[in-house]
Image: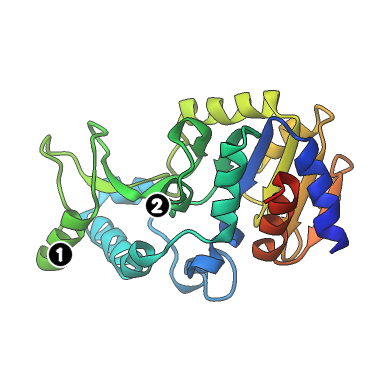
Amino acid sequence: MSDVSDLTGYVSAGRQILVFTGAGISTGSGIPDFRGPGGVWSKRKPVYFQDFMASEAARVEYWEYKLEGWPAMAAARPNAVHAAVVRLEQAGKVEKVVTQNIDGLHSLAGTSADFLVEVHGTNSLVECVQCHRRSEPGPHFEFFATHRTTPLCACGGYLKMATISFGQDLDPKTMERAYDAASKADLVVALGSTLSVYPAASIPLTAAKRGVPYVIVNRGATEHDGEACVSLRIEGDVGAVFPAAVDMALGT
């Protein structure tokens, strides 16, 4: 309980909190940690964006990979961590929620689009690589399951999930929103992330190196554990620690 009490103090004092989230917050929703045991990285290496654009065989492999995980992704529902983040926003204490996750659960939980920065995109939508029009995934998965060919946009462009694939550039406007939040935050809380994937992991560091408190909650080591700017490091289940701290900070 001392960890919860310490985190509560920081959350109570924060007025412009940058909440940074990783895959560890979604394991409670049935989505495996990307790099953890049973995670998708351990099962199959993803298709790189350059290969997707160059080869129909690679595009089919990409869609097979996404189709395999689609039922679990579509069935996943937000958990107590996502709900706690929403409560913080409703209390007027959030600067931005910056997430590495592509599961769309922050949005589904009720985090407002104005407060949400999905640095790696989202699996909740499909996007045309040519005109960037977005649409619901369901019909495209049905098409692929039937025809085993790449779904196409009305403009003729290839469709893929609205995520940043390996080898694909991050969206500059999205990153600008994230770093702008880091420049304004008065507290950074990193939840369920190994903080090993850059440049995303540089976002909480950018805020912390301004001198604002930096709290990390994760089960297992992170790459920021040795940073002098870390104010509080909690080893444990983010699903137990963070919602309890938010409840205490908000008096709910």
Q: Quadrant of residue 57?
A: bottom left
Q: Amino acid at mark 2?
A: Tyr
User: Is residue 82 left or right of 103 when viewed as pictured?
Assistant: right
Task: Give the left or right position of residue 212, taking residue 23 as reference.
Answer: right
Residue 175 percent location from the top left of the image: 54, 30
User: In which quadrant is the N terminus drawn?
Assistant: bottom right
Alpha-carbon neighbours of circle 1 within 10 Å: few (<14), some, or many (≥20)? some
Q: What residue is at 23 percent from the left and 61 percent from the top?
A: 60
Q: Is residue 214 above or below residue 66?
A: above
Q: Which mark is residue 148?
A: 1
- The circle on residue 12 is none
Please give the name of the residue rendered at 61% of the width and 61% of the height, measured from the top-left corner: 24
Query: Which residue does the image show at 54% across and 48% down from the upper left?
Result: 100
Q: Is residue 33 visible?
A: no
Looking at the image, which residue is at 27% across and 33% down?
132
Mark 2 crowdedness (10 Å alpha carbons): few <14, some 14-19, many ≥20: some
The answer to whether residue 125 shows anywhere in this view is yes
Q: Which residue is mark 2?
A: 48
Front residue of 195/78: it is: 78
The percent coordinates of residue 32 (x first, y second) are: 51, 69
Q: Residue furthest front?
A: 252
Dot 1 or dot 2: first in sequence order is: 2
Question: How was the colour assigned to the protein in this rendering?
Answer: rainbow
- Name which residue type carries label 1: Arg
